[in-house]
Image: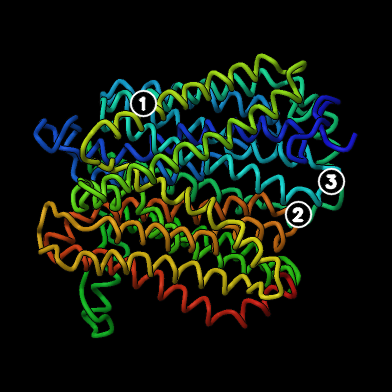
Amino acid sequence: MLYGGTEANQKLVLGHPSGLFVLFFTEMWERFSFYGMRVLLVNFLTMAVVQSADVKFPGWGWSSENAGALFGTYAGLLYLTPILGGIIADKLTGYRWAVVIGAFVMTLGHVSMAFETETSLYVGLALLVIGTGFFKPNMTSIVSEIYARVPEKKDGAYTIFYMGVNAGAFFGMMLCGYLAENLGWAYGFGLAGIFMLLGTLQFWLAKPLFGEIGEVPKKDSIQKVDQEGPKKNHFTVIDKILIGVTSVVGLLYLLNDPSSKIGGVHLLPEKFDVFNNAFLWLYNIGVGFFDFTLSGPVQIIIIGLLLFLFLIITRIIRYEKIVRDRMISLIIFAFFTVFFWMAFEQGATSLVIFARDFTNRSLVGAAAITFKVVNTILTIVPLFILTWVLIKLSKQTKSVIQNSNIVLGISFLGLWIIGGWMLWRDFSAETAEVTVSWFSILNSFFIIAFASYFSKWWESKYNPSSAFKYAFGLILLGVGFGFLAFGSLSIPQGAKSASISMFWLIMAYLFHTLGELCLSPVGLSQVSKLVPARMIGFMFGMWYLAIAIGNKLAGSLGGMIEEVTSKYDMTTFFLIFTFIPIGAGLIIGLLNPLLKKLMHGIR
């Protein structure tokens, strides 16, 4: 058989095995649920607690700082638990069971959040973090196993797979957001849970396609893999201690930030003067430029990061020069990755608040009609395409996974009903009220619209180096915030609301997406190309750590929108995210000759 799985999986849909499209739809429903909840969280937490003409459904009235702290910790943990989930799947559960466990735990998380109590919120977020740890790394592992005998077709397979990611994100943010803002928060959170459950069922019922793919690993096969090849660069006792210490420090910092700000519970000491004493001493002897202090938790996390840096350096210097150089280049890329996600993930924090409180979302006349037509096209066309793919899958697999296809059919019927109701309701109104969550779908839409063009660019003779892709990505991201900074010039200092044109937010999402298409595909592929086989797991963990730090910073900095706009103005806030990415992009562009030298021929 050409593809992994059973004989039934050899039946093709759009030139690929049927199992790929089962994974496509499973990932689609998971992303539907994840992004559907994600687009609501900060909006719900910061919404006013009292119903008024502007507030249909009250929220919790949190400050943006507290909401950003909670979201940053949640988003950061989402990139750390998959490291553990991948290990558990490799050693114990197998990929398929890990996906099912993760999906079921996430379903419980969405259900918990629908109750809208403080306890259920924290429980729900914790379950989502745990479930994602099982789900996220193992779906791609199953795709990889299906194409083990035909690696040349993997790129096309992953392109299709990630279309499922974006389709799910698109409809999740659109429909969960619409229900939450027009019927109530519980409807939005609840819808995310319903589709997560349906996605779990359709994947589980499709077992006959996969055969032994993703099954629980056999002990003898694990031992055989462990014994293959010479064991180089063992983790020493000191390495393991440093991994343990830095992991605990990082976890405590992530949890301490929201717990101290929201609940007054301090997991790390507030008083810790190691660096503050040094700063004061330097200032007193005339070396320091100014006297300032850092909080205890910040000083402790700096120590943790320094220990982790020491661990990385001591691991790398044990390798030969070429391998060592390549890993140094990867660390440089990881460093700049932090700056990208720190700014890009404002889409889940400060941009949500900007869309809600400072953007003119009430349209009348020709503008309202135009929006309704555009929104109809954006809804109906993707639904037709996805339904067509579902029909083709059902024809090929009706005798093997009929029950799975029935669950998928029910899911799509639900999509059509909710989407149709949304469009009918909008067209029945004389005006158009654009939901806050609608702007978030633009990222997925632009990815689907432009991804093929970027793919052709990367495959052409004009394919830029990795450093220049990073530079383009960071600069385009900064330009997107530049549009917001310019569009916010009319917002006075300390303003609580405004009616800025939607144009600026749409342009921001366009340039942010173009930046993502330049930078995002480079990262993980560079890990696989630049890192020795025995250190791939460790360096993947380091890469996810960089993304986690970026997400945490995104939440913390995004939460400062109220503080910055009260002291300065909205333009100043967005200029921070304009200059930092553009500056980082220019720097990594200048580092291109050095990085090419360090990579020793790897592109």
Between 171 and 148, the one lying in front of the other is 171
Q: Reading the chain from its start, which is encountered first: label 3 or label 1?
A: 3
Q: Position of residue 379 (x, y in %)?
A: 44, 38
Check disc 2 and report the residue beneath it: 533
18 or 134: which is nearer to us?
18
**Disc number lying in front (3 or 1):** 1
* Relative to 91, residue 439 above or below: below
Q: Which mark is residue 150?
A: 3
Amino acid of disc 3: Val
- In-front residue for pair 215/294: 215
User: Crowdedness of circle 2 by 10 Å Cα count: few (<14), some, many (20+)?
Assistant: few
Residue under the point 20% across and 32% down = 59
Precedes in sequence: disc 2 or disc 1: 1
Q: Is residue 28 left or right of residue 597?
A: left
Q: Residue at x 13, y 32 (%)?
A: 49
- For residue 434, what is the image quadrant? top left
**Could you tell whether 54 is left or right of 344 in the image?**
left
Going by the numbered disc 2, the residue's amino acid type is Ala
| Contact between labelled residues 1 and 3, with CB atoms less than 8 Å apart | no
Q: Which SS class for mark 3? A: loop
Quarter of the image that includes the C terminus = bottom right
The span from disc 2 to disc 1 (Cα, nearest Å) is 52 Å
536 left or right of 195? right
- At 45% from the left and 21% from the top, the residue drawn is 194
According to the image, label 1 marks what residue? 421
Vertical relation: 496 (above or below) 197:
below
The quadrant in which residue 401 appears is: top right
Q: Are marks 2 and 3 in contact (CB under 8 Å)?
A: no
